[in-house]
Image (cartoon, rainbow, N blue to C red):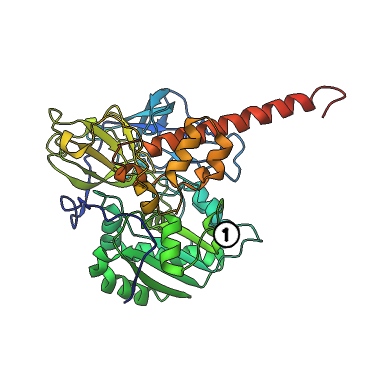
Amino acid sequence: MAVSTFKRGLRLPTRKTATEGKPVEQAPPPKQVVIPINQHFGAPNRSLVQVGDRVKRGQKIADAVSPGLMTVPVHASIAGVVKKIENRTQSNNTEGPCIVIEAASPEGGVSGETDTEFLPPLDAFSCTREEALARIREAGIVGMGGAGFPAHVKLSPPPNKPIDVIIADGAECEPYLTTDEAALTEKPHLVVMGLAIVMRITGVNRAIIGMEDNKAVLIPMLEREIRMGAYPGDIRIGLCKTRYPQGGEKMLITALTGREVPSGGLPMDAGCIVQNVGTLTAIAEAFTLGKPLIDRDLTVSGGACKLPKNIRAPIGTLLTDLPVEFMDIDYSVLRKIIFGGPMMGTAVASVGIPVQKNTSGIILMTEEETWMTAEGPCIRCGRCIRNCACRLSPVIVNINLEIGDLDGAVTAGLLDCVECGSCTYVCPARIKLVQRFRVGKQRLRARQALLAERQKAAASVPGRG
């Protein structure tokens, strides 16, 4: 099988050996969960429950006031009683409303069929497209690779954006993380089924399961599931080089199809839809079991984690609530906590932050695993340019941001940056380029919002607009 890739990028130490090949372990039932009301990219939700309400596992507890295209609901991940509805720090380091549920029984609130409220099973291959999309939304499914984009929105491209290939993203290029590999190993039938469901919804007859060549051993198992599933359409496996950021949508599309997503465009502009393998398994379970997205598989690893493993935990679980014998953390050497992978994840201040739908991992790093150095001046070495997978000039973007020229930064490619962190990783001056680009995008959004507000105000003045 030919092995493909994209230009530039990095060959990183994978640091996956601590959890690679390990099965996903079910976390002990938590005594409580802290569930953020908003866990998706889109319009905000509101709580559907009040303090004191009893809820079942799988019950919808938050949704938008007027459920629209860019919204997904949130469900209770354990059975219990709503104890609080209050603002808590979330994995993106912002304060947001959360529903705190205390387990109904001393042993926790995960098990017990009488305490569940799932959707009725639905045949994905006989229902209508509209019914299938509604099921995916009602199950609260978002992209589980990290972005949290509503899955039903991604599967509804506009008519002028024809799609001819679906890509299952199993590359998992981030160091430490191994739950996508676990999904391909333990749930290949659900991955293939979820992919077939997506193909039927979108009317696409061609699909590729993309993964890096460090997972080549899984090919026979996946090919067997494809044959046994006997789903309509052409489902194949595409092998890519183990290279960072191979798991990024744009890089994976280029490696597997030879196409490029245009500047300012989305995968659908290249005729593709990319779905993480974890998202595909959630889609399959939403139809076969009627199960909403209430559990999350994630990797907990790093030098400060004495028992690194892949775990399955209810959404809203705090690592601090897990027993020491299950998840032993050495706080004496813990120096950095990252939700997600070490390259694109977010550093947080505390372990007591809830697991969310898009939490692919929690990395507990020691001083030896982090860079604790101050920034130096840019030496114009060009390493950031040579290694940028998007073929941008990060140094030029940064110069424009430093002088306050947002338009110049946009012209240099600010909005095309996927924030993979390659430039920061190779910078000898240790300049936090990605962080600067994120702030630059926030400034740009704030400016656009201010401009829109001023235009709205001007239009409301009689005789103007």
Q: Is residue 229 above or below residue 91?
A: below
Q: Name the secondary structure under disc 1.
A: helix
Q: Position of residue 285 (x, y in %)?
A: 39, 56
Q: What residue is shown at x 41% (from left), y 65% (from top)? A: 255
User: From this viewpoint, is residue 62 visible?
Assistant: no
Q: Mark 1 points at which residue?
A: 269
Q: What residue is shown at x 13% (from left), y 32% (from top)? A: 330
User: Amino acid under label 1?
Assistant: Asp
Q: Which of 224 and 383 is in front in this view?
A: 383
Q: What residue is shown at x 36% (from left), y 62% (from top)? A: 190
Q: In this view, does 39 lie above or below 454?
A: below
- Left or right: where 333 falls relative to 130: left
Q: Where is residue 312 in the image (x, y as percent from the top left)?
A: 27, 46
- Left or right: where 226 falls relative to 451: left
| Quarter of the figure that contains the C terminus | top right
- Residue 454, quarter of the rendered image: top right
Q: What residue is shown at x 55% (from left), y 42% (from top)? A: 410
Q: Nearer the viewer, residue 170 or 311?
A: 170
Q: Where is residue 176 in the image (x, y as percent from the top left)?
A: 23, 48
| Quarter of the figure that contains the N terminus | bottom left
Q: Nearer the viewer, residue 282 or 242?
A: 242
Q: Is residue 85 above or below residue 36?
A: above
Rate crowding at label 1 as few (under 14), some (14 to 19) or many (20 or more) other CA atoms within 10 Å: some
Q: Position of residue 202 (x, y in %)?
A: 55, 64
- Residue 188, quarter of the rendered image: bottom left
User: From this viewpoint, is residue 183 visible?
Assistant: yes
